[in-house]
Amino acid sequence: MRERKAVLLAHETLTEDTFRIVLHAPEIAAGVEGGQFVHLQVPGFSLRRPFTVADADAETITLIIRRQGRGTAALEQVKPGSRLAFLGPLGNGFRPLPGQGLLLGGGIGTAALILLARRLGSCTLVMGGRSSGELWLDQVHLPPSVVIQYASDDGSQGFAGNLVQYARKNLKPGMWVAACGPRRMLAGLQELLRQRKIPGQFALEERMACGLGACRGCTCDTVKGNALVCKDGPVFAAEEVVFS
Amino acid sequence: MRERKAVLLAHETLTEDTFRIVLHAPEIAAGVEGGQFVHLQVPGFSLRRPFTVADADAETITLIIRRQGRGTAALEQVKPGSRLAFLGPLGNGFRPLPGQGLLLGGGIGTAALILLARRLGSCTLVMGGRSSGELWLDQVHLPPSVVIQYASDDGSQGFAGNLVQYARKNLKPGMWVAACGPRRMLAGLQELLRQRKIPGQFALEERMACGLGACRGCTCDTVKGNALVCKDGPVFAAEEVVFS
Amino acid sequence: MSRIVADLGFACLKNPIMPASGCFGWGREYSQLFALNILGAVVTKAVTPEPRPGNPGPRVTETPGGVLNAIGLENRGLTAALTEELPWLQSQGVPILVNVAGRTEEDYVQVAEALGDQNLLGLELNLSCPNVREGGISFGTDAKTVYKLVSRVRQVCPLPLVVKLTPNVTDITEPARGAEAGGADALTVINTLRGMAINVRTRRPVLGNVTGGLSGPAIKPVALSMVWQVATAVSIPVIGCGGIAQVEDVVEFLLAGAAAVQVGSAAFADPLLLPRLVSDLESWLEREKCSVEELVGAAHS
Amino acid sequence: MSRIVADLGFACLKNPIMPASGCFGWGREYSQLFALNILGAVVTKAVTPEPRPGNPGPRVTETPGGVLNAIGLENRGLTAALTEELPWLQSQGVPILVNVAGRTEEDYVQVAEALGDQNLLGLELNLSCPNVREGGISFGTDAKTVYKLVSRVRQVCPLPLVVKLTPNVTDITEPARGAEAGGADALTVINTLRGMAINVRTRRPVLGNVTGGLSGPAIKPVALSMVWQVATAVSIPVIGCGGIAQVEDVVEFLLAGAAAVQVGSAAFADPLLLPRLVSDLESWLEREKCSVEELVGAAHS
Ligand SMILES: Cc1cc2nc3c(=O)[nH]c(=O)nc-3n(C[C@H](O)[C@H](O)[C@H](O)COP(=O)(O)OP(=O)(O)OC[C@H]3O[C@@H](n4cnc5c(N)ncnc54)[C@H](O)[C@@H]3O)c2cc1C
Ligand SMILES: Cc1cc2nc3c(=O)[nH]c(=O)nc-3n(C[C@H](O)[C@H](O)[C@H](O)COP(=O)(O)OP(=O)(O)OC[C@H]3O[C@@H](n4cnc5c(N)ncnc54)[C@H](O)[C@@H]3O)c2cc1C
Ligand SMILES: Cc1cc2nc3c(=O)[nH]c(=O)nc-3n(C[C@H](O)[C@H](O)[C@H](O)COP(=O)(O)O)c2cc1C
Ligand SMILES: Cc1cc2nc3c(=O)[nH]c(=O)nc-3n(C[C@H](O)[C@H](O)[C@H](O)COP(=O)(O)O)c2cc1C
Ligand code: FES
Ligand code: FES
């Protein structure tokens, strides 16, 4: 983990509200784990913004960003060639478990699973969303050994239903689950995994100030009490998280 | 006076700390008077910045700006093609008097006199500064009928001495004076004009909030009491201003 | 009723947007940029009994996200207000709140009495002024002083009274309750926070008056929390003020419990901000299919 | 003596730059980015007698030029501080101020007594916490309460005592004088301003705790004016805090009368800000050919 400045190499639109930026960051690109994040400075803002390292090759890291408020909107305007400061890689990534991995990404949460999928080599990666217009995973190049599937609430692409329904149908004994998405989805998955006695890991989100573990801004509730999303997470064992 | 948005057409460096920007503002370019100003929005700042319209042709206005603090530094970074919002033209310009005009500009104050010189056609325009490196008036194209002179404290260009000393030496009966510059210079000139019974007009500067006359942020002291630099000025009869 | 109407209890305004006192003069200058009657109301510069020259310059400067001012209530006094400013503004067809200030209780009483028979939306009593009788502490810091002042003004003036509170207090609900008990019809929350800036080059305070009042987006969270607190503490309407710069800010104040809002400093950066807020709020309400009335205080439930 | 040395009266620091409590944990995380001993001192997260879980989330959000937080003094309690955090920090060769908080006077006394024989620069008593005995009003708002608390702590603890004041008061010089009379060796001015934000989408307060503390550049003018006032009111040193983000801000606080400064929120935007401020201040003093000592309070003359 270090403070760095990286040149923004490329900027691409994925959907109406989602874009991808590629940063030149050779010092971290090779070592970063799926689920780890960077704390990115958006010029002019008081707080940095946390983003999963969605993908990486030898020299670059890719962030996939959904426009949410002012910070992400400002980031969308940053031109290739600009330098952005960030701290990273931060936090603990996914720890692959034995067995076939089922990776479940709710919307932008899918960004947290791409690098894991690439590193696992063989697994199933499912992206869920309300309808096909929101699903951008086809624009990410992954090896054929990664099975890509979709789930949409309105049935316009892939499985018709949400990811909890998808998992209820497709989860098999011997699998393990990695998931990132809205809290409601994760809470539903947690219940399902508990019933089926299947291990899982969830990547959580919380508002952050320091991103390092110093300010206690990003606590979440776990069975062991408060934990810090930035330092103890963002990836937690599924059964540890307390959704309230 | 209206709120407008103008495209920045050109951006040129004049000296180490002074630059010139040209804005496309055909609605005001023909009518603006020497000494009037615009209140320019610098994106990201809480207050606008007042700048004299230094020059104008049929379609454009030119601002000559000295880097002073953060606002002017940010302005220096604005790229041609960008649009800047401003309110203008604001305030009262110089009112030419009978006789030969002697226009005395202390440093960046010279910007307030260029358009006046152009409109007068025939006059003497003197720029004063500490040394030749600060004098940029040679980079402004004026008709040959405008006599350009320089004064420098260190004698490195033109008259050796400040503008009050210059005026003491060169002021002749029948002339009138238009001046803009540091308060100390204007106070000295005021005393000289009083002694010689020569009429003059001074363009003043004050920090502004509204730029319109609504907030009373920019008052200056005159023999008639408080006056607003933005609305009653920025040009005042020399004998009216109270320097304390 | 239209979505955007604002109910102040003693009056309904066509919309909840008005300028904050002191940032808009008497509206003359801004009337060159837009018709004043598109606003919910106009709030004037402070009026004191006699003309006041105000503070020495510099009087304004900029801070991160904010503006510092120390105008010192410069104004031309009650007579000029009555004979020169008000008649013009009354011809513009917009409800008027006249902001009243003073250094003694009598000052407020005198101005309020003189304005009592004017056709106005009401008076806004600015209780952030230094109280000469109480050693320069402002009127608005003590519940009893506020109560006494408001009830005295109430006796001499039949107009609706809006009391504007200073945020420079330990517990703003105390003067708020004092004002309500004294007979205020509404409260404006807040005036500026005390602040200062120093010029590191000259090593002297930037403002001629040393300290000044901080306003602008920087103070929005403070203003919002005070509106939230006051709205819970009193049952008269609250007018929110402090740092509003965009339509979302207006909505935040309504949700916190403000019945209407005032916009000051942010209009310096954009002189067309007030009319834009009116139309942005219209679109926002349209899009969200709701009304100002439904939003007021909704974040409390 | 080096230009950049800061004199706190009870101790001299190699420079006047320290982190603000709660923004720096116990330094462990930032020690991965720079050596802690380049700082004038380190100020720890608040310690309360027992562990505290803190407030429900969200706990932090952003405002124009500022940060709002409602951490709720989450900490692992006195025992963990003494056995796990302090020994590590004491090995880093940097002077330490331990920030102490509580809900009753006894809480402060207990923590101060337990830390009394530690090798520390001193304790920083955070008097912005809600006082359960006084209905949740913070300790720092009343001069007498401050006096009483500080004198009791003074009796049980031989360490230098720095008292950190809340800005949410009508007149900050009153608790400042109370702290001085009670035996404080220095004052930290200021803690956060009460503020809030509302999410216009959910129509609910953003923070789980509804209100929070506002910090960052937005509050700098307020902090500066309070340092200016307090420096005139007391004769013990003042540590300035609130919105510092660049070397010019440090100089402003010194000129206003601060003997040293603390930097909190701005280090979130730039985690290397603290070491940069040390070197920027060194260059600034070099260029201006002056010392911290000469700057302290110079704007008053
Ligand atoms: C570990 C982690 C990884 C993340 N990875 C991604 C990613 O790969 N792609 C992506 O698009 N988003 C990701 N997010 C969410 C992303 O950080 C927020 O969408 C972003 O900070 C919103 O900023 P804004 O200024 O646009 O929104 P605003 O709502 O204007 O932000 C206001 C404040 O709230 C914070 N905030 C708002 N929403 C969130 C959120 N969901 N999580 C954390 N902070 C929030 C902001 O950082 C800011 O401090 C991640 C969050 C975390 C904690
Ligand atoms: C009527 C008028 C005409 C002017 N014309 C010119 C011009 O043609 N060219 C030029 O270079 N400058 C001119 N100035 C001065 C110019 O406005 C300031 O240099 C500029 O505002 C400084 O902004 P800043 O952010 O760089 O400085 P900062 O010092 O960071 O600004 C802080 C605040 O102080 C104000 N301020 C600082 N210095 C001045 C000043 N001298 N006058 C007014 N406000 C000030 C700023 O506007 C801002 O609100 C004029 C000023 C006035 C009043
Ligand atoms: C230049 C200026 C002058 C002001 N004059 C007055 C005044 O005369 N009376 C008053 O009650 N408030 C006055 N105020 C305070 C504003 O009305 C308002 O309460 C404050 O600025 C906060 O709102 P804002 O953040 O939208 O500016 C003044 C503010 C500014 C910036
Ligand atoms: C996340 C966060 C946590 C804080 N925790 C504490 C604390 O435990 N004790 C304390 O005295 N102040 C605490 N503060 C206040 C800061 O120490 C400081 O007084 C305030 O943030 C103003 O400084 P700044 O503007 O530089 O951040 C905290 C501030 C923040 C932002
Ligand atoms: S963001 Fe500071 S502890 Fe996690
Ligand atoms: S700047 Fe507002 S009156 Fe002149």
Image (cartoon, coloured by chain):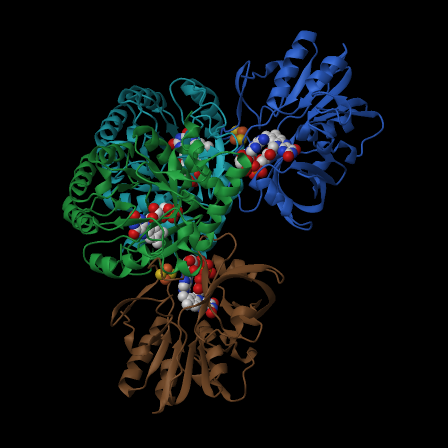
Chain colours: A blue, B brown, C green, D cyan
Q: Nearer the viewer, residue C259 or B32?
A: C259
**Quadrant location of residue D227?**
top left
Task: Point out the image quarter for the C terminus of chain C.
Answer: top left
- Indicate the position of residue D105 as horizontal and vertical percent values: 28, 22
- Indicate the position of residue C237 as horizontal and vertical percent values: 33, 35
Can residue B15 be spotted in the picture?
Answer: no
| Left or right position of A149 against B192 | right
Total numbered labels: 0
| Left or right position of D251 against D270 | left
Q: Nearer the viewer, residue A16 or D79?
A: A16
Identity of the residue furthest to the bottom in this view: B173
- Indicate the position of residue B40 as horizontal and vertical percent values: 49, 61
Can residue D136 be spotted in the picture?
Answer: yes
Q: Residue at x 54, y 83 (%)?
A: B142
| Left or right position of D286 against A33 | left
Q: Residue at x 55, y 13 (%)?
A: A223
Query: B35 above or below C238?
Result: below
Q: Nearer the viewer, residue A196 or C11?
A: C11
- Indicate the position of residue B194 as horizontal and vertical percent values: 27, 83
Query: A92 above or below C54?
Result: above
Q: Nearer the viewer, residue B110 or B134?
A: B110
Query: B50 above or below B31?
Result: above
